[in-house]
Image: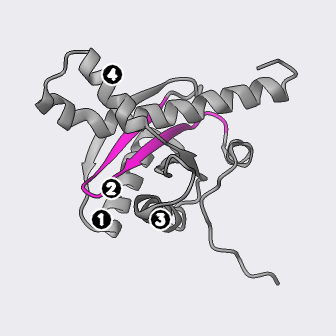
Amino acid sequence: MQEAQPRSPLREPEAFLAALKPGVRLFGFDVGTKTVGIALSDVTLMIASGFETLIRRKFGVDAAELLRLAAEQGVGGFVVGLPVNLDGRDGPRAQATRAFARNFARLTPHPVLLWDERLTTQEAERLLISADASRRRRAEVIDKVAATLILQGALDRIAALRRNSSGGTT
């Protein structure tokens, strides 16, 4: 009898899409040292919306809260932004995020996708400035907006994969 392998986050959107059940929503996470920005998709997996910003405590407490929120919202998969350096290498933040995603994946039967999030926080900041958000307001919502950009990027890729698998063009 083969021993069950520990669950680990996926890097390939194709495998993630194959593991999703129909009709589920996705959570997108922007994992920081002090907060986790959360975004939520619609059930068609087309649109990401800002959902919440979770203040970080201990991993076990954070994971339990994220899983509780996911159950309430019908979430069946998670996209975790991976903050790789511009040159594509992992720095300390990427290593910490990988550890978060790996530990989180062990607690849920749902697939977890690591998604390259280079420059999403800077893009979120630009969007909030262009919307004339005050510094205080930007600080309150930046992580949620970054999570939305991360999730939307993954949703766009999933839509392209669906089009390709159904014979459409990208």
- Whether residue 17 is visible here, answered yes or no, is yes
> Residue 143 at what x, y percent from top left?
31, 40
Q: Is residue 34 magenta?
A: yes
The reply to whether discs 2 and 1 touch (Cβ–Cβ < 8 Å) is yes
Residue 164 belongs to the span the image colors magenta: no
Quadrant of image for the N terminus = bottom right
How far apart marks 4 and 1 lie (CA) works out to 31 Å
The residue that label 4 is drawn on is 127
Q: Are marks 1 and 3 in contact (CB under 8 Å)?
A: no
Q: In the shown orientation, is residue 135 left or right of residue 29?
A: left
Q: Which residue is mark 1?
A: 61
Q: Does residue 97 sit above or below 30 in this rendering?
A: below
Name the residue located 36 percent from the left edge and 61 percent from the top edge: 64
Q: Which residues are magenta?
A: 22-41
Which residue matches tag 3?
95
Question: Is residue 50 in view?
Answer: no
> Would you identify the image quadrant in which residue 162 lies?
top right
Q: Identify the amino acid type marked 3.
A: Gln
Residue occupying image coordinates x 56% and y 45%: 115
> Outermost residue, front direction?
87
Q: Which comes sooner in the sequence, label 1 or label 3?
A: 1
